[in-house]
Amino acid sequence: MKKFLFALSLLLATSAQAQVLSLRDQAVVVNQLLAERFDTVLPDAMAQTGIDLWVLVSREYNEDPVLKTMLPAEWLNARRRTILVFYRDAKSGKVERLAVARYNVGNSIKAAWDMQKFPDQWQALVDIIKQRNPNKIALNTSRHFAHADGIDHTEYDELLAALPAALKSRVVSAEPLALRWLETRTAREMQIYPQLVDATHKIIEEGFSERVITPGITSSEDVVWWFRQKIRDLGYDTWFHPSVEIQRAGKGLANPDIIVAGDLLHVDIGITYLRLNTDIQEHAYVLQPGETAAPAALNQAFAAANRLQDILTANFATGRSGNQVLAASLQQARAEGIQPTIYTHPIGYHGHAAGPAIGMWDMQGGVPGSGDDVLRPHTAYSIELNAAGTIPGWSEPVRIMLEEDAYFDASGVRYIGGRQKSLFLLPRRAPTIE
């Protein structure tokens, strides 16, 4: 615990730029967070879903997405075939954590394979299951959530072939349990998450400045690769390649990718750190000669997108499906004269994470399957959307595309590290010349 508190204190004691922990200290934090999740999140999730035995199977380099989140920081992959078994005793509520493997899986999951008694790994698993006689044997199969569909065809067939008929009939999908494990954020994780969001915001702020962009020279692709390199140089990873988009009143230069005065810039960027992810989209305006602010119509369009965020987050409620939140938010936004598109998704262990989808850019009528899942507290979302508006002098409607990471619990939705409320201006201050 002392090592964890020391590493966490280093993480939280940040100045202008968040301090990135050494790999060793990152491992301390990751393993402590994981141990806490095994002690708290897992028992609650198993009790809520009524699943008393959960089996996860992976072979090296073909890891189940859920199992991957359960490996200690020192394990970059499964080893040979790794089988994890979690059994919850209904009377005590305690969860037994076992590995049908040659080694302990970190300090939280003990090896339980007697290779002399059971040379065959599947038979060792069957013996563990028989001894516990569960009501349900949950495997990671899912039609609508790739995160919960991690057992591959070969492993599934071999496991089912090894189970006696009496046990085979108890096999169920672990989808609800897998989703709760992945989507639930702990109090300690939410102490750390603001640091990731703040770091992402600071990277964007620097990238959308004259330190990086020279109008008439710098291209959007130059800025994309600056973002990618900056993330790596700071010691973070990213789960997707950044993008920078230009919207402008006219066609401008022959090369549409060169940034010029009057451009509206948009970035989509995310970082990965301590197994958590961010996903953020923000905008900047490149001032024209003589301008000290963005055109009023652009500021009004930005305010409409902020209002769309407010409408969406006000519709979050425990037990309401993603499709219900989407429909209510779109209806309200249109009634207020906003042209909305909403494509909000959970975030956490994955960028596009487990849990209810609240629209997709090409599915504004609802998302079958994942959109039918309901919102649960202690979960995180990327509030991703856009509002389109007509700007005088612009040949095409402008889309203000915003994305900010937020946390949802019984008190409602709060932005983890704030949100953009006005356009970045480039340069930061228009020069005054007398």
Image (cartoon, rainbow, N blue to C red):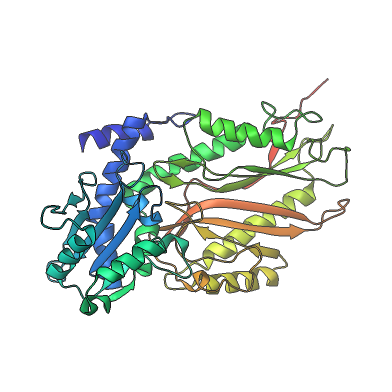
Q: Residue 311 placed where, x, y %?
A: 59, 64
Q: Could you say which quadrant of the image residue 30 lies in?
A: top left
Q: Could you say which quadrant of the image residue 336 lies in?
A: bottom right
Residue beneath the point at 20% across and 44% down: 107
Closer to us: 102 or 23: 102
Q: Is residue 222 left or right of residue 149?
A: right
Closer to us: 193 or 136: 136
Closer to us: 171 or 86: 171
In this rendering, the answer to whether 293 lies above or below 171 is above
- Which image quadrant: the C terminus? top right
Q: Is residue 77 left or right of residue 50?
A: right
Q: Give the tally of numbered discs.
A: 0
Q: Is residue 401 something one can see in this rendering?
A: yes
- Which image quadrant: the N terminus? top left
Closer to us: 127 or 90: 127
Q: Residue 352 placed where, x, y %?
A: 51, 55
Residue beneath the point at 59% across and 52% down: 403
Q: Is residue 415 left or right of residue 117?
A: right
In this rendering, the answer to whether 153 lies above or below 262 is below
Q: Residue 192 placed where, x, y %?
A: 38, 42
Q: Residue 39 placed where, x, y %?
A: 22, 54
